[in-house]
Amino acid sequence: MSGIVFIISAPSGSGKTSLTNELLKFVPDLEFSVSYTTRKPRGSEQNGREYSFVSREEFERMIANDEFLEYADVFGNYYGTARRFLQDAKNRGKDLVLDIDVQGAKQVKERLPDSVSIFILPPSRDELERRLRARSSAEQMTDTRVINRRLAEAGREIENYPGYDYILVNDDFNQSVDRLKAIVQAVRNQRKPGASHADLVLEAKADECRRRNVQERAQQILASFGLSAVPN
Ligand code: 5GP
């Protein structure tokens, strides 16, 4: 079975891009869905690789033509997943990874109930702050207001974790890559026609990230952001 859609969401600074890149490097027949955005390219980003960069007018034309599976306004810019991308991947026998925000994830889950959603959580607010500071000092952009805004945004996004199928707490990079790979492979195995013998080690590793098994830890992380528990 191909054409499985894996949605990955996470607040900025939680390591999502590095984890996704590592996943794509090691898992065959898995492709990255290149979103359309109206934001400007950053750093070494290339048109058609990280994003397809388009004008607002072009994006709005695509909305009017119903070309998006989902789209959202994230921090003042449009971001969207083209339906065409999904169909192309499926035709070529590939599964797809969507790196999209919580609004987009909700839309995809509604339209494609078989999609698999994964939320990456930072270990705590302090650790996320440390990572955001390290990253912004590397980019020579140590603006405390920006960091505080990102931390507040992170808190708001994190509250959405109960809507996801799997929750990955990114304490340790290699362990997280391992778990991410296990989730993809376990889902693929389960959906293979006539799947008979499950890979128990893989299943167990993926299962560790099931919402019910991460609940307690996730609530502690929410508490570190000063947020109260959300119903699971
Ligand atoms: P950035 O501008 O930092 O690359 O991404 C900002 C946010 O937009 C991230 O949370 C990212 O997951 C999200 N995003 C990227 N592409 C899409 C998309 O196609 N749709 C939606 N809804 N969000 C997206």
Image (cartoon, rainbow, N blue to C red):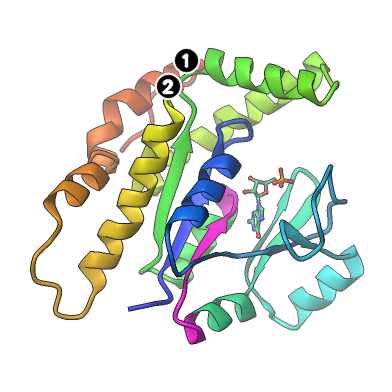
- Write down the residue under mark 2: 221
The residue segment tinted magenta is: 90-103
Name the image quarter holding residue 56.
Answer: bottom right
Callout 2: 10 Å neighbours few (<14), some, many (20+)? many
Q: Would you say the residues marked 1 and 2 are in contact, meaning their CB atoms lie under 8 Å apart? A: yes
Q: Residue at x 12, y 51 (%)?
A: 200
The residue at 69%/18% (across/down) is 134
Neighbour class for label 1 at 10 Å: few (<14), some, many (≥20)? some
The amino acid type of the residue labelled 2 equals: Ile
Residue 91 is covered by the magenta coloring: yes
Residue 84, horizontal then vertical, whole percent: 63, 81
Magenta segment: does it hold 160? no
Residue farthest bottom in this picture: 91
Say which mark, if any, is on residue 224.
1
Q: Secondary structure at mark 1?
A: helix
Query: Residue 231's spot in the image, x, y percent?
Result: 33, 35
Circle 2: element type: helix
* Residue farthest along the left direction in this orientation: 197
| Residue 221 seen in the current view | yes
